[in-house]
Image (cartoon, rainbow, N blue to C red):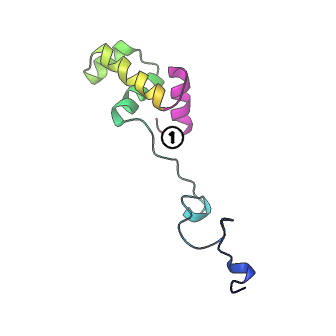
Amino acid sequence: NSTSPGRRADASGGGGGGGGDTAAGLGGVARAPPPPHTDKEAEALRLAADGAHSREIAAELFLSVGTVRNRLSSAVGKLHARTLVDAVRIARDQGWV
């Protein structure tokens, strides 16, 4: 066998390049994955997280209430949440809002 035990080329994760974003690979600092939602959806989520209602978000962002509802609904779906409250919790836990 030409490979020594310390240099095995298997999927055990111990060796050379390409291992992805692990905490050890980044000097011990884990990085959150990028958000699946758009910046516009995140902005609406951020305001909702602060307790704003759709009408208030619409006024703040100069949008129609329907557009705000669509953005929030889209963000809920992309985060695989059941409700807006769940989506806000997920986004907060990930550091996206």
Q: Residues within 10 Å of mark 1 (few under 14, many from 20)?
A: few
For the view shown, which residue lies furthest in the front direction?
1
For the view shown, which residue lies furthest in the left direction?
62
Report the front residue among 62 and 23: 23
Q: Residue at x 53, y 66 (%)?
A: 18
Report the front residue among 17 and 49: 17
In the rendered image, residue 78, in percent from the top left (x then y), is placed at 46, 31
Q: In the rendered view, does 39 fall on the left or right side of 29?
A: left
Report the front residue among 85 and 76: 76
| Quarter occupied by the N terminus | bottom right
Tell me the amino acid under the disc marked 1.
Answer: Gly
- Judging by the rendered image, the residue that carries numbered circle 1 is 95
Question: How many labels sit on residues?
Answer: 1
Q: Residue at x 74, y 80 (%)?
A: 5
Q: In the rendered view, does 89 fall on the left or right side of 48?
A: right
For the view shown, which residue lies furthest in the bottom direction?
2
Is 78 magenta? The answer is no
Q: In the rendered image of this protein, does residue 72 appear above or below residue 90?
A: above
Q: In the rendered image of this protein, does residue 60 appear above or below residue 36?
A: above
Quadrant in the picture for residue 69: top left
Q: In the rendered view, does 40 fall on the left or right side of 16?
A: left
Quadrant in the picture for residue 81: top right
In the rendered image, residue 71, in percent from the top left (x then y), is placed at 37, 24
In the rendered image, residue 35, in percent from the top left (x then y), is placed at 45, 40
Determine whether the residue tagged by mark 1 lies in a helix, strand or loop: loop
What's drawn in magenta, residue-wise?
Answer: 79-96
Q: In the rendered image of this protein, does residue 29 appear above or below residue 52?
A: below
